[in-house]
Image (cartoon, rainbow, N blue to C red):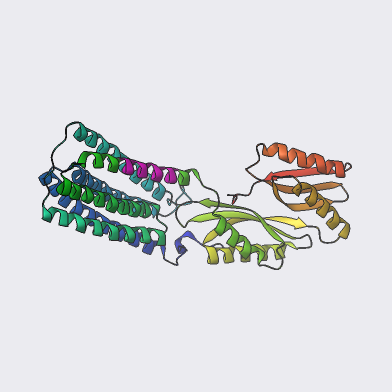
Amino acid sequence: MKPKYTDYTDSNGNNADSREKIIIRTSIIGIITNILLAATKAVIGLMSSSIAIVMDAVNNISDAGASLITIIGTKLAGRQPDKKHPFGYGRVEYLSAMIISLIVLYAGITSLTESVKKIINPDIPEYQTASLAIIVIAVLVKIILGRYVTTTGKKVNSSSLINSGEEATLDSIISASTLLAAVLFLAFGISLEAWLGAVISVIIIKSGLEMLKDTVSQILGEGNDAELAKHIKETVTGYPDVLGAYDLVLNNYGPDSINGSIHVEVPDTFSMDRLDRLTREIQEEVYLKHKVILTAIGIYSSNTKDEHIAEIQKRVRDIALSHQYVRQIHGFYFDSEKKTIRFDAVISFDAKDRREVCRSVYEDIKKEFPDHDIKIAMDTDFSEK
């Protein structure tokens, strides 16, 4: 029997409610920490006329806003499926991650604008020992916060938390650079504040663009996780009656919320009740082991009664695989009465023209079996990297 969404747990065995609480708690810690750091850095930056420190404070405010968006996104994503969205609202988390990326990008552009103004009209910074000591503490706090948030984000598979954690780690590097500029000024009287602010801004912009690229890729729909696909196929083919597992398609409806479909190859002697039991057992085991709901299992029947047909299958396979971009064939079936040969051919995305490859395979097999009707379905390996 297929598991219900309300019984869902993530890949670490956490209940969905527990995952939401972890993300919210981590985000609140991030908000409080960043607000305290922003206030402290703003005071120090204004007192010392340091544009780099002020921009660093602005970046902390954007981090706090990002954590707030993470909380909102997580609460919205946790809504139960309904008629309008029967697969749930999990993808809202990807939207919140995208908003965080845009906030980071905006902060970087704003910072770069202010830094360029200071390069044109520079101010002489005035540092104090106490101020520098506070910056050192801020660096250490951001390093700890970054590792904590990133580790938690990976544990609960939250793109928003991972983005926030990576940003916090980046902030620690930025703050350390600001500290270095202060030391250089005190030691040699060289003011690099505005230039450092510009460098920091470019780093922030680059980080924002990379986050945005990754998040948009998730929203568009990425290919199957190759490792997960491999393990699912291993589970399915672990059944003695399953001769092969193909055409695995995984649809991501949010972090740790995956539906999928697969084709299995079984002997052509199977009865309907035996097929029914097998498919239900496969659905249950795949969910229990991998937390993937197989909404559909297609069936390929394999000829098992005739050695002559097995020889034909081998010849067809050899011809097909002799073509460079044919990765595999499956779903083979030979109908001696109608003289029909049918199978699926998996053709790599590396081929310049996949249809042309399929046509070439057809022509070569047709030459070998001119009196037969050849039916080839061009297939895709969604786990191909």
Q: Which is more toward the observer, 197 or 166? A: 197
In this rendering, position of residue 156 left or right of residue 117:
right
Question: 299 and 31: which one is in front?
Answer: 31
Please state which of residues 269 and 334 is positioned toward the viewer in this rendering: 334
Whether residue 156 appears in this view of the structure is: no
Secondary structure predominantly adopted by residues drawn in magenta: helix
Residue 155 visible to an observer of this rendering: yes
| Residue 278 position in % (x across, y down) | 67, 65
Q: Is residue 30 above or below residue 341?
A: below
Indicate yes or no whether the magenta region holds residue 189.
Answer: no
Locate residue 282: give its quadrant. Answer: bottom right
Residue at the image position 36 percent from the left and 42 percent from the top: 206
Instruction: Name the quadrant of the N terminus.
Output: bottom right
Picture coordinates of residue 127 (x, y %)?
Answer: 12, 48
Q: What span is colored magenta in the figure?
A: 202-216
Q: Position of residue 13 (x, y in %)?
A: 45, 67
Residue name at image x 33 percent, y 55 percent? 165
- Residue 131 at x, y percent in the picture: 13, 53
Q: Is residue 22 above or below residue 87?
A: below
Residue 363 placement: quadrant: top right
Asked if residue 203 is among those painted magenta in the image, a careful observer would answer yes
- Tell which residue pokes out farthest to the front in this image: 188
Q: Nearer the viewer, residue 199 or 111?
A: 199
Please tell me which residue is depicted at 18% across the width and 41% down the height of the picture: 191
Question: What's the residue at 60%, 49% (across, down)?
Answer: 382
Q: Residue furthest top?
A: 120
Left or right, 211 with reference to 140: right
